[in-house]
Amino acid sequence: MLIAHISDTHIALDTPDSETRISDFERTIAHINALDPQPDVIFHTGDLVQNGRLDEYTHAVEILAEARAPVYVIPGNKDDRVNLRSAFVGASYLDRKSPFITYAIDDFPVRLIALDTLDPGNNKGDFCADRASELTALLSTNHTKPTAVFAHHPPCKINVGPEPWNFVTDEAMQRLSEPLQQSENVIAVFCGHVHRPDFGEIDGTPVTVIPSIATSLRWGEYPEAIKNCPIYFLHSYDPATGFSTASQVVDHQ
């Protein structure tokens, strides 16, 4: 199984770098569309837009509509749940009954679980008792299939940048990480938020953090030749060895 992982596109229509953010997103989708083999899915781990506005989501949805592979999204701290649901009204995987955008996809060799860590008005993530119950229930429905978990905020210590911890409280992060520790079939966690690549773990389970697609917002040191090139990750699953991850540099010659 092959997963194209993108994050933090921050589509905006009224910032000095609006056109750059839009171009970065469009170029990334075009690059993914040209892959051979094609990924089974494209997963966006949040901060799809900058201000949670419907006009921003309309533009983002138009870009994602060009994708050849199925697309799945979760909210980041810049997103708005109501407007995101409205923009993706045709997405059957979004549960309209739950107050949170949490779901599982069972159509592939790896089960995909998407988690909502949004705390409105806060840059850091939250994971309340209700969300922890949802996660525990999802994990309990399948004890055998290998599972990858997607969240915007990394539920572990980040080794780069000024913020090692990205949840509002230690307890909130523990409410997310503890069910993963107790599950025998969670084999990987994939996140965004910190706008730079990093790798961590939760009790031995690897956590992979992707840089922002928006190059004007990306942090970290990059060679001059790729400073304006979006970077996304391809996660390839092998039943014998688990996931391996490769960086993809868009439009780099």
Image: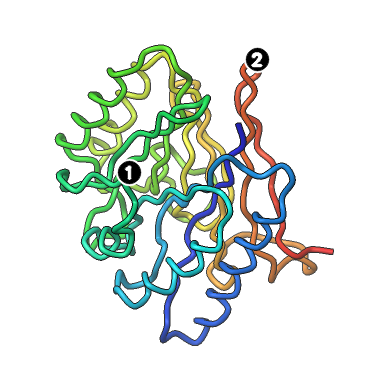
Q: Is residue 173 above or below residue 237?
A: below
Identify which residue is drawn at 21% across, 61% down: 82
Q: What residue type is labelled 2?
A: Ala
Q: Which amino acid does label 1 sit on?
A: Tyr
Identify which residue is drawn at 60% across, 61% down: 29
Residue 104: x and y, percent?
35, 34
Residue 42: x and y, percent?
53, 48
Q: How crowded is mark 2: few (under 14 residues within 10 Å), some or many (20 or more)?
A: few
Q: Residues within 10 Å of mark 1 (few under 14, many from 20)?
A: some
Identify which residue is drawn at 65% across, 57% down: 231
For label 1, the residue is 93
Q: Is residue 251 above or below residue 108?
A: below
Screen quadrant of the N terminus: top right
Q: Nearer the viewer, residue 188 or 237?
A: 237
Query: Distance between the Cα atoms at labels 1 and 2?
Result: 29 Å
Q: Is residue 176 left or right of residue 226?
A: left
The structure's colour scheme is rainbow
Q: Residue furthest right?
A: 253
Residue 17: x and y, percent?
53, 82
Cβ–Cβ below 8 Å for labels 1 and 2? no
Q: Residue 223 carries which label?
A: none
Residue 81: x and y, percent?
24, 58
Q: Is mark 2 on a helix, strand or loop?
A: loop
Identify which residue is drawn at 84% across, 64% down: 253
For label 2, the residue is 240
Q: In this view, does 179 lie to the left or right of 67?
A: left
Q: Is residue 75 above or below residue 199?
A: below
- First in sequence, mark 1 or 2: give its number: 1
